[in-house]
Amino acid sequence: MGRVTELLLSGKGILDALYDGVVVVDDRGTIIYVNEAHVRITGIAQEEAVGRHVTAVVPETSLPAVISTGQAMVGVRTRVGGHEVISNIVPLRDGTRVVGGVSVFRDLSEVTALGRELEKARTQLRHLKGELLLSRGEDRGLVIGRNPAMQDVFRVAHKAALVGSNVLILGESGTGKEVLARFIHTESPRHDKPFLTVNCAAIPETLLESELFGYEEGAFTGARRGGKLGLFELAENGTLFLDEIGDMSLPLQAKLLRVLQGKEIKRLGGTGSRLVDVRIVAATNQDLEALIEQGRFRRDLFYRLNVIPLRLPPLRQRKEDLTLLVATVLAKVRMSTGKPLDGVSPDAMKSLLAYDYPGNIRELENILEQAAVMTEGRVIGRDDLPEGLRGRSPRATVPAPSRIADREREAMLEALQAYPSKAEAAKALGISRATLYRKMARYGMKP
Ligand SMILES: Nc1ncnc2c1ncn2[C@@H]1O[C@H](COP(=O)(O)OP(=O)(O)O)[C@@H](O)[C@H]1O
Ligand SMILES: [Mg+2]
């Protein structure tokens, strides 16, 4: 027993308690000591290892090199007993003379396994958080389901709720634009302030103007005494939902833009203007880009509104959620009709799945409500469904525009896959690259 052994003895118990492998050699490289972790990692018993040359036990070890150079090596990746390890090797000195060396190493596979466990736990947590968020929407009567596009919309909507930015909701009629707007409001810090809705398509232009901005007494003949507060003032600190924004007239668009830029409104017939704090959520089923190109919608207003765009998928593109939607809608119908309904028959479900729903969720609601009235039993059968649904031609009722959109989308996907660059794909499609990018954005395709 040499000097190295004596140095060791006092600390031996501690070394055995370590999780890292420890091997100590003398100046010739003969193993003098290995700790218990070394045994665990190498699978070689203490008695067997001690007394042998270290390279006989760990062929790739750098211990001999450290002893001959006297230079420590840190963070060396090697293999020990079939395990990948990372080791720190230092020379042991007696004064200036190197009398041996110590290698301390950690099994990387154990480290990576732990890391993987941690990553798994993190993923689960993220997943649970996501589920929690989705179920929050579902608590509010918003079916989100499994459709990835819908889940994305919902996640962004939830984030949008927390900031004050303007939101533009796009989607065909009946896809849930209003429901989503309401959700954004109820999830926002403004939830205890008003949520007001105005349908820009349903009200004549002059009336819409006074609805939005209000008027002073005597502003026009027939104006109410004392004037009238506009929606902007009534929605103060809350949210104003501008539905069918694509139908707003150009002059009104200009006025709206001024409000959005300056945050001030002027009543009709009024002189002064006042500051308002209203969050705008706008929605449309129209193609605003096309309207802009036709000069029917202001580009600058579009940019103001389009801070956070949310594109709701049409029901025919989220058929995986249909069963869930049917169940939710039936629960609603049960409440409104008071009829005891257990569900739909497998036949009827098949027909419902095959249909294309040009009117989206609203149409599904109508179909199920009608069927609920029709049915004599507690289960809605195929015969209770409207005639158009019972047949075999599911695409027959889709209106032309959406079919064109679907075809356009398909053609773009094909071209993008077939050509290595966007420029070539655009050329093949006979459109400019800018148009291709715009259309890709419109259809929610990733660049
Ligand atoms: N995600 C959804 N889950 C359940 N019902 C929905 C959902 N989206 C919309 N609806 C229902 O569909 C109908 C149409 O929704 P709405 O928000 O008015 O559509 P839009 O404004 O796009 O025309 C409403 O009765 C609404 O309750
Ligand atoms: Mg609507």
Image (cartoon, helix red, strand yellow):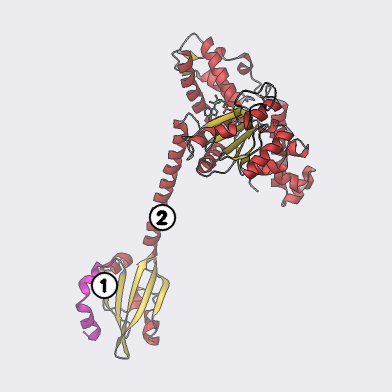
Sort mark 2 into few (<14), some (14-19) or many (20+) by Cα contacts within 10 Å.
few
Furthest residue toward top: 376
Residue type, numbered disc 2: Arg
**Which of the 4 image quadrants contains residue 233?**
top right
Ranked by sequence position, the earlier of labels 2 and 1 is 1
Residue 3 belongs to the span the image colors magenta: yes
Q: Nearer the viewer, mark 2 or mark 1?
A: 2
Residue 405 shows in this picture: yes
Q: Residue at the location (53% across, 32% down)? A: 195
Q: Is residue 265 above or below residue 383?
A: below
Q: Which residue is mark 1?
A: 48
Left or right: 99 as drawn, with respect to 444: left
Q: Residue 206 versus residue 18: which sits nearer the camera?
A: 206
Checking the image for residue 307, the label placed there is: none
**Which of the 4 image quadrants contains residue 428?**
top right
Chief SS of the magenta region: helix
Q: Which residue is mark 2?
A: 116
Secondary structure at badge 1 equals helix
Residue 174 shows in this picture: no
Q: Which residues are magenta?
A: 1-18
Q: Residue 359 versus residue 357: which sits nearer the camera?
A: 359
Furthest residue toward bottom: 96
Q: Residue 416 versus residue 61: which sits nearer the camera?
A: 416
Q: Residue at the location (55% across, 22% down)? A: 350
Residue 183 belongs to the span the image colors magenta: no
Q: Residue 190 versus residue 391: which sits nearer the camera?
A: 190
Q: Position of residue 90 (x, y in %)?
A: 35, 80
CA–CA distance in space, label 2 to label 1:
34 Å
Q: Position of residue 249 (x, y in %)?
A: 72, 32
Residue type, numbered disc 1: Glu
Q: Residue at the location (52% across, 36% down)? A: 238
Left or right: 442 as drawn, with respect to 193: right
